Image (cartoon, rainbow, N blue to C red):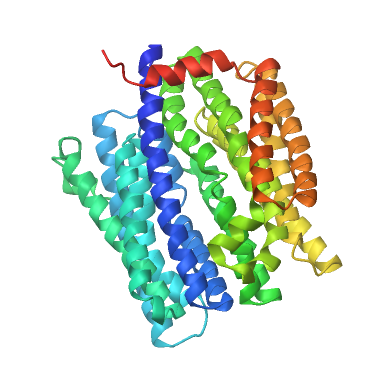
Amino acid sequence: MKNKNEKIRYFSISILFLILSQIVAQLFRFIARIIIARYSSTDVYGLFSVIWNEMSFLGLAVLLGLGQQLTIDLPRFDKNKKKHMIYSSIFYSLIFCVIISMLALVLNLIQIDNTYKYSLIVSIFFVLFLLNQFILIGIKDFFGIFLLNSLQNISLLLLIVLLRNRLTIENIAYAAAGSIAFASISVLLYILVRYRYLLKDIRRDELKIFNFHKGRFYLFVVDIVDSVILYLLVKLPQIIWGSSYAGFVSVAFSIMSFVLILPQIITISTGPLISEEFIKEEYETMHSSFRTSMSLIYLFQCVIIFVFAYFGNPIIEFLYGIEYVSGTFRLFYGFLFAIIIDAFTYPFGMYLRNTKHENLFGIGKIISLLTFVAFESVLLFTTNNMMVIPISYFISKIALLSFYIYSIIKMNDRIETNDVKKLLLWLLYIIISFILILTINYFFDNLVYRLLFLLLHTFVFIIIISLTKIVNLKSAIKNILSIIPSKK
């Protein structure tokens, strides 16, 4: 995509559907979680959080890095190879869905009282959900991603509303499984029908278990590492302090997931583009795509961070109720500080992954996991404080981002050192701003004053990053205006 207007159009369409997808997903999922929190107990909410993260871990483990491979290779492949890869992936996933179903049946028949008997049931359909998501990213069908997320989260909310007076952990798990099954099967049919021209004339000998390449082992590690960290975030508090504490951690981290929406959207839309440009050896265009993604994060991420930093406690109280504030607000700000760093692991990781450096991408994730487990273990033995969780998460993300930056600098001909300097300067300004916001919050409880500070702070920050040339504000505004259709 050498034409600048084509690239702007690609970013505008992909980001539009991904923003809509994330808004629908986060909004309806949040409302469902709020209903669960308000109509059940902190223990039930905590158990649900553990089951949800166990489901994510099991689903990603079963796919063996297949999702990462689909998002990298599908944009590069011709029609015939796309067909083979998609059908083989579906066949592979269906086999493991049957195996998981058998395990879930056994655990429920012998009536073992643990969370796995519920998470296995949900995982049966979550494998197909993930497969749909990865295929749609690989073929750059961002409307399909919007459809998938909308169907799952809207149906989940409807089921939770209907069950609001009977929100036992069993009913919540079955509602989650039902919503994921409905969305997964519907979108799988959508893929098979819409892309029938791509997928037709499949032969029986092509229906074989997906051939996982040994050279892509690091991609399997990536999925497992991410899901293990998210699982440990809620599982360890449940084991050590009880299910209600797992609920507090889940509330803090789930609210923080809003801060990561923008980096995730930009990474999802830019990843296939960079993969395609890399394989075509369009390196200048590829570097331009990466810098565009970074500029978007620099410009808009600060606004999201400032909103959550200024209004953390009111947001928690409004969404979940006053009983969650005392156990959550410190965790909330701890995770917010960590996610400032985490946001930039997405574009740098995406760049490494899509330029045939999956090994560095995977090694960084392993370093992140080992750092998280090591610091969490040491801190748990030395102090009985819930802040151990966000502190360990923050240190692990520092380690991950540092490794990615170091790796890219060592590559020399890929990204200029100036790009790294811009990132470090932006992070410095954000950290100073974060400390300033906490100080303002300490002295000003009035929300109107905080809103005025937010507007002033955001305006000054954007001017600063423009004057220091972190972002070319004039060019950014021009690109945004070029997306808006002309009235002529």
Q: Is residue 363 visible?
A: no
Residue under the image location 51 percent in, 72 percent down: 38
Residue under the image location 67 percent in, 68 percent down: 236
Q: Position of residue 269 (x, y in %)?
A: 43, 32
Q: Quadrant of residue 376?
A: bottom right
Query: Residue 436 vs residue 234: left or right?
Result: right
Q: In which quarter of the image is the N terminus?
A: top left
Q: Where is residue 401 in the image (x, y as percent from the top left)?
A: 68, 37
- Farthest-out residue, bottom: 110
Q: Quadrant of the C terminus?
A: top left
Query: Residue 474 vs residue 249: left or right?
Result: left
Q: Can residue 34 be seen in this view?
A: yes
Is residue 180 or residue 227 the one in the foreground? 180
129 shown above or below 158: above
Q: Where is residue 351 in the image (x, y as percent from the top left)?
A: 55, 29
Residue under the image location 62 percent in, 68 percent down: 322
Is residue 344 or residue 307 the one in the foreground? 307
152 shown above or below 222: below
211 shown above or below 350: below
The tally of labels here is 0
